[in-house]
Image (spheres, rainbow, N blue to C red):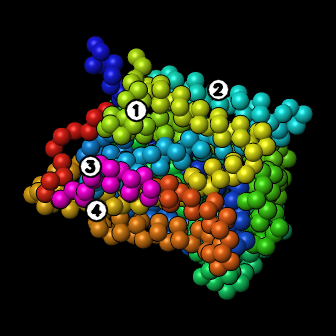
Amino acid sequence: MAEQENTIKQQLKTRHVSMIALGGSIGTGLFLASGATVSQAGPMGALTAYLAIGIMVYFLMTSLGEMATFMPTSGSFSEYGGRFVEPAMGFALGWNYWFNWAITLAVDTVAVGLVAQYWLPGVPAWIFSAVALTFIFLLNLFTVSTFGETEFWLSLIKVVTIIFFLVIGIATIFGVIHSKVNVMDNLTVGHHGYVGGWQGILSVFVVAGFSFQGTELVGITAGEAENAKESVPKAINSVFWRILLFYIGAIFIISALVYYNDPRLLSAANNNDITVSPFTIVFKNAGIAFAASLMNAVILTSIISSANSGTYASTRTLYALAKKGQAPKIFAKLSKQGVPVAALVVTVLVGMFAFLSDVKGGNEAYTWLVGASGLTGFIAWMGIAIAHLRFRRAYVRQGKDLNALTYRAKWFPFGPILALTLSILVIVLQDPSSFAHFDWEEIGITYLSVPIFVIPYIVYKITKKSKLIPLDQIDLDSKAEN
């Protein structure tokens, strides 16, 4: 009985896994910042960037899917990095990813307060934030199926909103809804729709990359899926096309119906004023009077969904590290519901600390904390690509049949190589102007994620004498602990 209680519960259904993967990548990046990408790179430039990043994310998900169906584990790419590359890689990836989501929880908590004040401006923002943090803690304290069901409905709200937006947008473009907008003029500004040349497209790459982050959550859910071999491939195959349709479709409609240098588009990425969301602009132009309230509610849902998913991901990552002896053993203890409570508590405490630093006016400390988590998603993507390259090479080297794989990533090794290359490109191009002007504070805030990964990697490598595992010695036979 004790052994059964110390095992995670595989209670996530296929629809949960699919919707978590879909909802994890749809958030304020689409609802707010997408308009700024059109103003920076022009309609075709924004579409090009999102299409390129979307293709990269698809290949990344197929890489993760191949490993997750072969070896389902809540540790996901942290486990794969440690097993297929070297222990130091898994250690650094795991702690870096946990830290990222713990800080993201704080950022989302603060954002909930700001957005909720749209309806009740007289109530202090910290009250809404505290209620949201408590709600998220309780959701993650119960069974994983409770988390999955909640995330399913939160994500469904976002999906329905985007479909509604696409329908309204198409109806406006084809004149079903009266509009004075000149669609062709909007789509062909600059040089056939491109503004700012290659520099404009590359600048949008960064925003597009952030917008797609969260898709890797499908790997973490594999360890608690009822049938990972069925649900993970289905999630990957269906979610990619939905994400691509939603993002490319939304960017196209924004480009067609809102002129690229409309000042509202540019300001949307720089504040939380929902009236400048490109979705709100299109809805208002279509005569939908309650557009601002509708989008404010959807964005509030998106933020809570992000915080909920992030809390889940961070607690499972910390749990997996503890199971491997790379974190205190207390974080490996599970409740009767199969939830790592100690890992959940410390994650929420870190989020609360960052949240309080902002509430109490510690803006500088808060800014550094946010900056420290900024590039972690791209580092995780790099880790997935490297682990997959090593996994497939080891699989072939050890004479195993590729046809025996439940799910096989397409176009190997092109996929992980593309993902690795573009992730490095996005990291390098995150803020090149800070290097041009030798703004060390800005460099520190922007690139702090990199040393937070590199330093633990080097320290673990030296202290534990971690070495790259030879391909013929990589363990492909024993199951990952759950």
Which of these two is toward me, 353 or 396?
Answer: 353
Q: What residue is shown with label 4?
A: 389
- The foreground one among 280 and 393 is 393
Labels 2 and 1 touching (C-beta < 8 A): no
Please name which of the two marks, 4 or 1, marks the residue nearer to the observer: 1
Question: Magenta stretch containing residue 125, yes or no?
Answer: no
Q: What amino acid type is highlighted by mark number 3?
A: Arg
User: Residue 30's quadrant in the figure?
Assistant: bottom right
Residue located at (47% from left, 31% from top): 343
84 relative position to 330: left or right = left
Closer to the N terminus: mark 4 or mark 1? 1
**Residue 237 picture location, percent across and down:** 39, 52
Does residue 298 appear in this view?
A: no
For the residues marked 3 and 4, what is the alpha-carbon distance in whole angstroms? 13 Å
View extreme (right): residue:
122
Residue segment shown in magenta = 454-470
- Describe the element under mark 1 as helix, strand or loop: loop
Q: Separation of disc 4 and disc 1 at Cα? A: 30 Å
Which of the two labelled residues, at mark 3 and mark 1, occupies the earlier sequence position? Answer: 3
Mark 4–mark 1 CB contact (< 8 Å): no
CA–CA distance in space, label 2 to label 1:
25 Å
Q: Of callouts 2 and 3, which one flags the residue occurring earlier in the amino acid sequence?
A: 3
* Rendered-image quadrant of the C terminus: top left
Going from N to C along the chain, the mark reached first, 3 or 4, is 3
Q: CA distance from mark 2 to mark 4?
A: 41 Å
Pointer 2 with pointer 3, Cβ within 8 A: no
Q: What residue lies at 79% left-to-right and 73% top-to-bottom?
A: 261
Q: Is residue 30 above or below residue 113?
A: below
Mark number displayed over residue 83: 3
* Horizontal side of residue 143 vs 361, given as left or right: left
Q: Which mark is residue 328?
A: 1
Q: Amino acid at mark 1?
A: Pro
